[in-house]
Amino acid sequence: MIMRSLRLEADLDERVRRAAAVEGSSVSEFLRIAADERAQRTLSQRPSERLADVIGSVNGGGGHARDTGGAFADALNERRRTR
């Protein structure tokens, strides 16, 4: 078993201690279960679910992305000419 340490704010530490006591488990066991549940939930989500709150929220400014390849090539050619 690997040992980790973490810092908790005083109010969260108190809630964790109380919740562990209610469940009849140690604080360490309570935190292990909480970490396992969170890891499973996070890892089971598809990337689109993890990014759902930001998908579609950015406006690219009018679809000029197709011009970037040409603009980059022009910039490189200009740089070569000035050297």
Image (cartoon, rainbow, N blue to C red):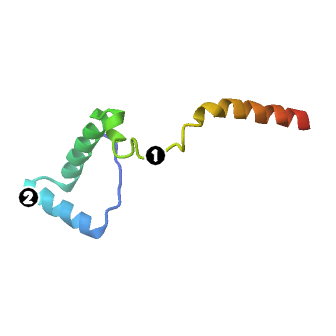
Place of residue 8 in the rendered image (x, y in percent of width and height, measured from the top left): 31, 62
Q: Is residue 83 visible?
A: no
Place of residue 28 in the rendered image (x, y in percent of width and height, measured from the top left): 23, 52
For label 1, the crowd category at 10 Å Cα-Cα, with few meaning under 14, some 14 to 19 and many 20 or more, is: few
Left or right: residue 11 versus residue 62 is: left
Place of residue 51 in the rendered image (x, y in percent of width and height, measured from the top left): 37, 41
Between residue 29 and residue 46, name the one nearer to us: 46
Asked if labels 2 and 1 touch by Cβ distance under 8 angstroms, the answer is no
**Secondary element type, mark 2:** helix
Name the amino acid, label 2. Val
Between residue 64 and residue 12, name the one nearer to us: 64
Residue in the image at 52% along x and 42% along y: 60
Would you name the residue on which mark 2 appears?
A: 22
Left or right: residue 83 versus residue 6 is: right
**CA gap, disc 1 and disc 2:** 45 Å
In the rendered image, the vertical position of residue 68 relative to residue 58, given as above or below: above
Would you name the residue on which mark 1 appears?
A: 58
